[in-house]
Image (cartoon, rainbow, N blue to C red):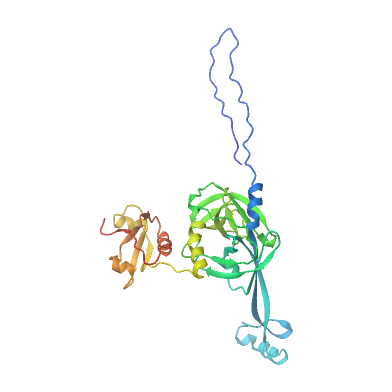
Amino acid sequence: MKKKYVLMLAFMMPLCATAPAFAQPVQPQPAQVQAGFADLVEKLSPAVVNISTTQKVKAAQGYFGMPFEGLPNTPEFEPFRQFFDRFGGQMQQQEREVFSLGSGFIIDAEGHVITNNHVVAEADEVAVTLSDNRKFTAETIGRDPKTDLALLKIKDAKAFPYVPLGDSDAMRVGDWVIAIGNPFGLGGSVTQGIISARQRSINAGPFDDFLQTDAPINRGNSGGPLFNTKGEVIGINSAIFSPSGGSVGIGFAIPTALAKPIVEQLKAQGHVVRGWLGVKIQEVTDEIAESIGLGTAKGALIMDVSAGSPAEKAGLKTGDIVVSFNGKEIREMRFLPRMVAETKIGSSVTLGYWRDGK
């Protein structure tokens, strides 16, 4: 907490027969207290769900139930292997169930639920539990591992409560946010914080563009919503940076600007189809920028152009630096793949590129 100081200026008063006039002391004012989020949370919570998954896996079991699959095939282990083959019988594949927990949120009255791909990937059964303890078996409509998003569907005769998707691009560093989810399987829990940073890359995938927040996010919060103060979802909580596995105030959420087109495709066709330019690119370093007269390091340096690709047909060459895409500046190389991927297939785009000093 920052300490507040009242600065007082000292100055010389001329001597006089009358008593000197002193400045009036500053009257302290009541501190401005942030209004609570109780009313907003009460409105949003019914659309936030807990997700539990069941996966059946097989494990090799040997003598006395001890697993010996993967035992090193080396001479020192051979006596043990012969003993267990003789007295323990052949190893058997035994099936067991693995359970995991996560979060999600309903986006329409029909029961479509957004969560993380890693929450439901490889699951044999997915169950969705609402805040009123109603439980539904969910159908997986589609998954996109590259953005870690998944779309589920639950069914009921009644319309489901849902929350709207907001504009993550309108969020600024310092804006208040609220996270609701299922940390450690405890059930609906609410935390609050601010947007700590934007456009974070954590090497989670080719289209990293995370919102960073200090709102506490823990295991089980994955797939849950990050709200703005209007009650709109502006992010999907996905990852944390932590040496202990618990929240240390560094959490990451997929922005809705990235999620919206993915969810639309999953809802329409169950999978994602992305645009393709047909180039291999690398980062533009300060040394490269200086050597070609670009000034500042920006854009994406083309290392190779695929034969027959849109890039080749448009006349792009190895050594060109793409600096804008449909009028949007490419400050870093990683922005170009996302822009291309989000572009509708068959559409025409305008590229700005640097070649031969101009």
Q: Is residue 354 above or below residue 21?
A: below
If the image is split into quadrants, where does the C terminus sit? bottom left
Which residue is nearer to you in this view: 35 or 91?
A: 35
Which residue is nearer to you in this view: 60 or 217?
A: 217
Position of residue 205 in the picture relative to residue 289 (left or right): right
Residue occupying image coordinates x 64% and y 51%: 43
Residue 317 appears in the rendering: no
Residue occupying image coordinates x 65% and y 53%: 190
Q: Residue furthest right?
A: 64
Q: Is residue 205 above or below residue 357?
A: below
- What count of labels does the image hold? 0
Q: Residue furthest bottom?
A: 86
- Residue 159's quadrant in the figure? bottom right
Q: Is residue 23 above or below residue 150?
A: above
If the image is split into quadrants, where does the N terminus sit? top right
Q: Residue furthest front?
A: 157
Residue 207 appears in the rendering: yes
Which residue is nearer to you in this view: 23 or 121?
A: 121
Position of residue 158 in the picture relative to residue 302 (left or right): right
Residue 143 place in picture, x, y as percent: 53, 69
Residue 346 place in picture, x, y as percent: 36, 67
Residue 320 place in picture, x, y as percent: 30, 62
Residue occupying image coordinates x 74% and y 83%: 64
Residue 315 place in picture, x, y as percent: 27, 66
